[in-house]
Image (cartoon, grey):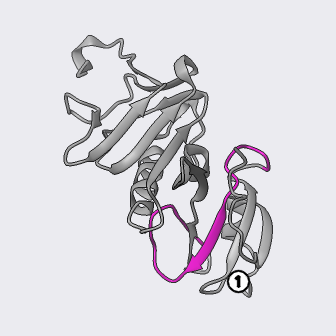
Amino acid sequence: FRFGNTYSGDVDMKVMTALEMKSADSNFLREGKIIRTNGFYTSGDGGAGTYKISASSGAGAVELDNGMYAILIPDTMEMDGNKWAVVSAKQFGAVGNGTVSDQTNLGAAFYCASEATNDDDIYRSIVYIPEGEYKCTKQLYVNIHDVNVVGDGDSTVIFTDNDYTDAYEFFMWSSGGKNLYLADFKVEARERDMSRYYR
């Protein structure tokens, strides 16, 4: 699936990455403009996206240097006659390298996908978490509805280690979510300091 490429309308500007978009020429970064990127941190890193510029923040927003926001437009696909919204954790800056914390980026992907289901055209949403090790240093909220969260099997791992700082028994938390489907990823506790082992 080629993320960032299913938007069928006109695109006003193309830039290599979301980071480059943050500081792009402000003449192009005005309300309603559509920007397409080839990646989040680097071109081809799996975080390509199409964004709409807005004066207010929203699900999947990238704050721009000029004070505006770039709101990710979820990709879409047709399955069994229904339209699905599709986002990748990479489109929100998740890296999955096992070193930096990705819980904020994963949370943003969940929220964006859940918000997309408020559109009458969208049947459900998919959050794809590509192969990698996604570290969480705080509680990860999964309070979303009508969303499938899927990974690449055993090669997608969401984990905590001794850097986890929240004193909550459950680091992955869903309360009030409905019609939620989780599949094809592992959840691990990797704490070695037993005095801080909450999970």
Question: Secondary structure under badge 1?
Answer: loop
Disc 1 marks a residue whose amino acid type is Ser
**Residue 103 place in picture, x, y as percent:** 43, 41
Q: Which residues are magenta?
A: 43-64
Vertical placement of residue 151 versus 11, above or below: above
In front here: 55 or 82?
82
In front here: 174 or 134?
174
Q: Tell me the quadrant of the picture where the C terminus can be found.
A: top left
**Residue 64 place in picture, x, y as percent:** 60, 72
**Residue 92 place in picture, x, y as percent:** 56, 52
Q: Quadrant of residue 161?
A: top left
Q: Quadrant of residue 25?
A: bottom right
**Residue at (59%, 52%) from the top-left corner?**
78
Q: Quadrant of residue 140?
A: top left
Residue 146: say if magenta.
no
Look at the image and tell me whether residue 172 can be seen.
Answer: yes
48 relative to 77 in the view: left or right: right
**Residue at (53%, 17%) from the top-left corner?**
154
Residue 44: say if magenta.
yes
What crowding class fits label 1: few (fewer than 14 Cα within 10 Å), some (14-19), or many (20 or more)?
Answer: some
Q: Assign the magenta stretch its main secondary structure.
A: loop
Vertical placement of residue 161 versus 111, above or below: above
14 relative to 75 in the view: left or right: right
**Residue at (23%, 22%) from the top-left corner?**
198
Look at the image and tell me whether residue 137 can be seen.
Answer: no
Residue of label 1:
26
Vertical placement of residue 22 versus 48, above or below: below
**Residue 117 place in picture, x, y as percent:** 41, 60
In front here: 127 or 139?
127
